[in-house]
Structure formats: structure tokens, C-alpha cells
Amino acid sequence: MSEQGSQSDPFGPSLGLVTSARARAADEAAVRAGDRWSDLMARAARHLAEGVRVQIGGEVAGRRIVVAVGIGNNGGDGWAAAALLRDAGADVTVLAPRGVETRGSEEAMGFRTAWLTSDGHVVADGADAALGDADVIVDCLLGTGSQGPPRGEIGDAVRSISEARAEHGVPVVAADLPSGVDADTGAVADGAIIADLTITFGAVKRGLVMHPARDHVGRLVVGQLSTWHEPGAQLQDGDAFDLPHDATLAASTIILGEEGRGDDKWTRGRLLIIAGSADKAGAAILAATGAMEAGVGLLTVACVESARDRVASALPGAMTLVLPEYDGCVMGLSPQAAEAIARVDAVLIGPGLGPIREVREIIDAVRLRTDVPVILDADAINVFWDRVDHLGTQTGPLVLTPHVRELARIASDDPAGSAWERAVQASEAIARIRGTEIFAPRREDAPEIVVIAKGPGTVVTDGRHRWWDGVGGPELGVGGSGDLLAGMVAALVAASPDDLLTASRTAVFVHGVAGRRAREVVGRRPSVARIADEIGPAFRDVQRLLDAGISAQD
């Protein structure tokens, strides 16, 4: 999910990803410009009331609705929404845990007072029956400023709402974010509410699009509050509204664009894959399959002789070269492979090679012979665990495709637990390679580096710009899936070597679509072979959306 886009961008419409601090700054800017806090709450309340109507699927008159309110402005949104829903004919109960009546803002207390003086129904505890019988629950307990697990009376209310949804199937509409979800990191506290619909106000909070929070958000809708909340709005001291290091990838060249009549195997990208060992020929085959399904023009696979027959028989459309070996493992480049490097547009190294010293030597040899993009996967990343800065001597563009544990080896000691942590670790890895501070701008003479941090909510980053995948799911968690992705990335990079970011996120996105298609076909977690079969159709699906002018995220 990105922060800027266009109708020609297959990755979705423009969304401003903001931190909780930036969201608060936008609120304050709107108030300084003449809005009142109560005006913002009233607008948020209207969005919530409409969200309840949408969730119900019709008019709210006669429906039982419980609005759970907490302290602060989120609570004010809830008090105001309760009045709107009651005015529309709904049977509304406000669940207000003890203590919220003394800790709210003046504006929130104003909406509370209006509810009470109009004989609105309020319960402080013992609301389990009302929650279980409700048609919809509106979660306004905790806002963007909350961190850690919900505690005390609020924590009790969160647990009761979660039980009502789990045991009675009562849908939940969350105000701004589900209670227990961290707005900035996407971390989820134990017992956090799982919403069916989340109405986030002003702009999308960064954590809502990241794992594991995205599994708690349900359908995500933005409720506009003011022009100060729109991407690009200028806040106090001239700061741009978008985040300094979360500005999204611009919608640039679309790799799935039309093919010209003059296109041939040379113009569609020439790729060399160095992969496979005696007992891991399958990794080379899967990487090559991903590249071929992604439309590579000319493909050469260099592998050890003990794997060549299997690779060649599985890939009739690819050329093969033999690498020297000892005991089934690669020992270096052959003269033929060294010559092939000069004739390709990209080189993929790693799948199935093994974490041996010779792999590092191969990478160094490739880097000395070419300035074309080099894609490192699997053991081609692992061999640099103690000297990732050695990659800083790379003269051409570089793409790394680590999974969680591989990323930890080149960035920090502990595997990341959330997509946000993986994004930070990926930026740390790039900084270590370049020998700079994290998030430092790339020097003009420095080659481009992209890290694809695989996992739930895969992250694509060049160290300063980040994109989170919202398509791929647990169906991709099967052995060999990463080899397919590496091949897809390499094929698209070979076809568009000057646009690594778009090539990388295109591959990640289509890989996710292929996984979804495979799951739909088999009705369960698919095999890697089934995912491979769906790569071509996935490209077709995305192309059809582009041709129709529809965002692929819609």
C-alpha cells in the first residue's frame, strides 16, 4: 500500500500513511485555521454513523447498537455518533467504563453531557448481555495515542467486545483503529479487538496497513475531516504532511504496460540465474519458473553438472550452463558463465546454492564483470552475515530478497516481529551496506539498493521509501515460494533495469495475487507448484484491471 498513486498505478489509489503524531498535528492545524475540536468530532461521528449503516446493509432504525466509549477525543466521537444513530431510529446503548466521565476533553464531555441530558441510555459495566444481543458494536474505546495492552476498566470492555464478536458473531465498527492496535507500528496487544470495518479519520495511520494489525482492521475506509488532513497539506513550520521516510513510491513506469509489435526476446530482458546444487536443483527450477512466468525474454540457468539434467528437462525454454563443483556444491564460475554475464540485463544469485564461501566468491566475480542489477536471494544473502558492508563495493544496482531470519542476520540480531520492524531492519541493512546512517539520502554516485523483506505484509524499500504489500497471505508460506518470487523479481528487473522499485513491488504484488488464486482453486493452502501455475493468470488479471482503469487494490 502506497502513499501516492494514480489511476494508472496497479498498486492502488493515493493514500497518506501517517503516524499518530502527524495525525494529531493535522487536527491542531485545522483548529488553528478556524475549525473547532467539536467540529472534527462531529464529522468523525457522521462517518461512524454511516459506517454502521453500511455494516448493517440498510437503515439503522430499530437496530440494537452498542457504542463503547473511552477517554479523549475517540470517546467524544462515540458520544456524538450515539446521538446521530439514535436520531436515525436505532436503539442505542453507550458502554462507558468507569472513569471515562472524569478524563475526557472539554469537547468530548460536551457530547457526553448532551447524551445524558437527553436521557440517553448508559451502562458502565455488566454490558455482556447488551453486547451479545447487539446488531453492531462501535469501538471508540482507545485512540491513536494508546500503546500496550488495554488495562483496567477499558481492558475489561475490550475483552467483552471481543467475546461478543467471537461467541455471538456481532460485527464491530472501529473508530480510527481497533482498540489494542498500535497506530504507528501495527503491533497488536493480547486481546485486541478484531473489527469488521475500521473508519480511520483524516488519513490512514501507518500501522493499520501492516502485519499483524491488518488482520484486525477488516475493511478500511478513510473518513475525511479537513483539507489539513490531505496528503501534501502544509502544517506548522512548513513541514509536509507526508512522513519524511514513509513517502511512498511514486507511480512511475508500469511494468505491465503494453508490449510493442517490435518487442522480441532481446527487449523483454535477458537474465542469468546462478542457482542450484546436487540436492537443491528444485530451487533453481522454481526460480527459473518464476522468471519465465513473469515473461523474461532470454533465460540462462548456470548450475552444477549434477543438477543440470534435472534443470534442463524441467525448463525446455531455458539455456543451461555448467558450473564447477565438488561433492555436489558449486566451486565458482565457469568460463562460459563468466562470458554470459556480459550478455545479460540482470543476474540472480542464490537459490539452492548453500551457505558456502564459494558463493561469496561467485558474487564478487559477478560484480567485477558487470554493472547490471544483481539480485541476491537465500544463501547469497546468508554468506554476508558478518560482512554485509562488503556489498557496499557494488558498482551496479542491487536487490536483496531476505526472509525474516535472513534479514536479521544482515541487519540486527533478533528477527522482526511485525512488518514495521522488518521495514526498519531493511533500512538498517541498506545503511550497513552503504556505510551510512539509517535513512540517509543516497549519494548521486551510489548504486540503487532495494530490499524486499519477505513475510506477512512484505516490505519493499530503498532505505527511504517503503511500500507494504496488502495482497499476499499465509498461502505463500510454503517452501519454494520465495524462489518463485526471486525469479519474478529478476525477470522484471531485467526488463526494466532502471526502475528497481517498481519492478520489485510489481513482482511482490503479482506473487500475492498468484497465491490468492491458488488458494481459491484448491480451497486450502496451495502447493508451490499450484502457485507457480497461477503466476501467468495473475499477470493477466492485473493487466485486465489496468486496461479497465481500475486499481488493483480495489
Image (cartoon, grey):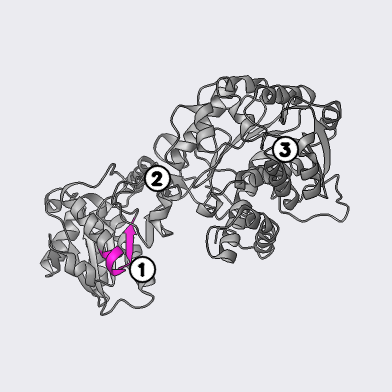
Q: Amino acid at mark 2?
A: Gly
Among numbered discs 1 and 3, the one appearing first in the sequence: 1
Residue where numbered disc 2 is placed: 186
Tell which of 483 and 120 is nearer to you: 483
Quarter where residue 163 is shown: bottom left
Q: CA distance from mark 3 to mark 2?
A: 32 Å
Q: Amino acid at mark 1?
A: Glu
Secondary structure beneath dot 1 equals helix
> Which residue is under mark 1?
50
Amino acid type at circle 3 is Asp
Q: Determine the residue positioned at 26% across, 69% down.
A: 84
Instruction: Select label 2 or label 1 by which is in front.
Output: 2
* CA distance for labels 1 and 3: 45 Å
Q: Work out how far the residue at label 2 is from the one at label 1, CA to CA, in angstroms.
A: 26 Å
Residue 72 falls inside the magenta stretch: no
Residue 498 tag number = 3
Tag 3 and tag 2, C-beta contact below 8 Å: no
Q: From this viewpoint, is residue 428 visible?
A: no
Q: Nearer the viewer, residue 223 or 397?
A: 397
Q: Position of residue 113 (x, y in %)?
A: 13, 60
Where residue 131 sits in the image (x, y, percent)?
Answer: 22, 67
Indicate the quadrant where residue 12 lies.
bottom right
The mark closer to the camera, 1 or 3, is: 3
Residue at 36% over, 68% down: 50
Callout 2: helix, strand or loop?
loop
Number of labels in the image equals 3
SS for callout 3: loop
Q: Quadrant of the C terminus?
A: bottom right
Magenta residue span: 164-175
Q: Identify the mark nearer the N-term, 3 or 2.
A: 2
- Residue 245 in percent (x, y) is at 50, 35
**Label 1: few (<14), some or many (≥20) within 10 Å?**
some
